[in-house]
Amino acid sequence: MALVNENYLKLSGSYLFSEIARRVNQFKADNPEADIIRLGIGDVTRPLSPAVIEAMHKGVAEMGSAETFRGYGPEQGYPFLIEKIIENDFTPRGVELSVDEVFVSDGAKSDTANFQELFGADNIMAVTDPVYPVYVDSNVMAGRTGTFNIEKGQYGKIIYLPCTEQNGMKPSLPETRVDMIYLCFPNNPTGMTLSKEELKQWVDYARKNRSIILFDAAYEAFIREEGVPHSIFEIEGAREVAVEFRSFSKTAGFTGTRCAYTIVPKEVNVYDSKGEAHSLNQLWLRRQTTKFNGASYPVQAGAVAVFSEEGKQQIKETIDYYMENARIIREGLQEAGYTIFGGVNAPYVWMKTPNDMGSWEFFDKLMNDAYVVGTPGAGFGANGEGYFRLTAFGTRENTLKAIERIKRSSSK
Ligand code: MLT
């Protein structure tokens, strides 16, 4: 008799974005004429840039000729891409990395979900609340979280760090010792950021407690303001305690093509029960070489074009386009009287629901009254209840239309 991994039975409900898709599909089936605008999942709508497409075509052509064909690539990514990542994303910010500290992959979702495998089951983990659900669910699957308390909407063994209106959506340091800390800044879902000084407090905490910070920087390309760190490695001492996840998905339109990378400095250690140190870099390499065979060559060939002069220009235009959407959403909602957060250095706007309405109730109301789909804050954690997330990744036309419809529906 095959036994189930009972940790899977502890998962609460279905994956957030699958549940939203299910509800939207049901609504569409019941209302086939409804012109639905999706500002729910953070999926991009602008096509890959011409420089990337040209490089991908070339990559595909190389795969079709015996002289240039490539089979398995290096599991951790081709050096031609890793060198450009370091040269463009880190060196200009004063961050020195070596080639074997960068691991190219097929997505930050899989990397953030998989990385927890390197940690013991008894580690205490902390997450912000609200939080990107993948960090929590992947740890539930691994048996690190205890069971779900339906009343609280939280797992028993996770330390939740509330991000609320009172603290400006900035988590406070844990009051008790934690071993693994997930931080995402610019934040998904709140769209808020930490300053260098604020992030330094986390690095100092981790150094003092020998904890590891799992830092998700998937949205760094959307930072507009000075003083907001793009990488945790801009903070002194972070190389000893942090791992950073980056993605081409939102930055360069790779959500459907899949390419990302994770930085694991050689100084970051985890400890065995005897207190002996082990290199996280070596463990991740071991994990990836066993379980992953590298992102595909044409995709990595396309990703490297993101760093060409034309690529950089084209990608900047796309990011500007989305950030103009963010401005339209932010200002439109403010005009309609909503309290909002984010959208200045991130492609997400986090709004308070009107009259303390539950987030799923507001989700249904917007879908029914305005044919607009967003993401209910409660799907990101107990402290997301009473909030709602809209993404700036829609088309301009749909973004403008959605805001007009929300304004109309809220004046009813
Ligand atoms: C989101 O909407 O939060 C993101 O699209 C999810 C993801 O990147 O996996």
Image (cartoon, grey):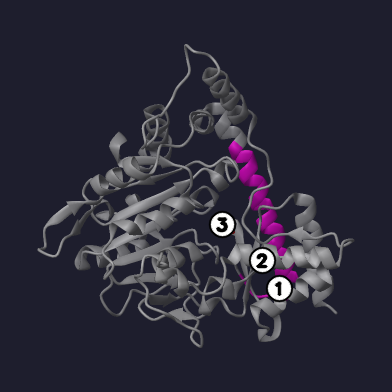
Q: Which residue is mark 1?
A: 363
The location of residue 257, given as percent across then percent down, is 57, 40
| Identity of the residue drawn at 48% across and 53% down | 109
| Identity of the residue drawn at 28% across and 54% down | 238
User: Based on the displayed image, in which of its 4 quarters is residue 148 positioned?
Assistant: bottom left
The answer to whether the residues at label 2 and label 1 have Cβ atoms under 8 Å apart is yes
The N terminus lies in quadrant:
bottom left
Report if the beta carbon of the residue with label 3 is closer than 8 angstroms to ligand 1.
Answer: no
The location of residue 322, given as percent across then percent down, is 65, 50
Is 114 rendered above or below residue 16? above
- Tag 3: residue type? Ala
User: Distance from label 2 to label 1 (Cα)?
Assistant: 9 Å
The location of residue 101, given as percent across then percent down, is 30, 41
Q: Earlier in the sequence, mark 3 or mark 2?
A: 2
Q: Earlier in the sequence, mark 2 or mark 1?
A: 2
Q: Which residue is mark 2?
A: 20
- Tag 2: residue type? Ile
- Tag 1: residue type? Phe
Looking at the magenta stretch, what is its main secondary structure?
helix
Q: With 412 as the anchor, is 360 left or right in this view?
A: left
| Identity of the residue drawn at 16% across and 61% down | 272
Q: Nearer the viewer, mark 3 or mark 1?
A: 1
Q: Nearer the viewer, mark 2 or mark 1?
A: 2
Q: How many marks?
A: 3
**Does 150 lie within the magenta span?**
no
| Identity of the residue drawn at 58% across and 66% down | 16
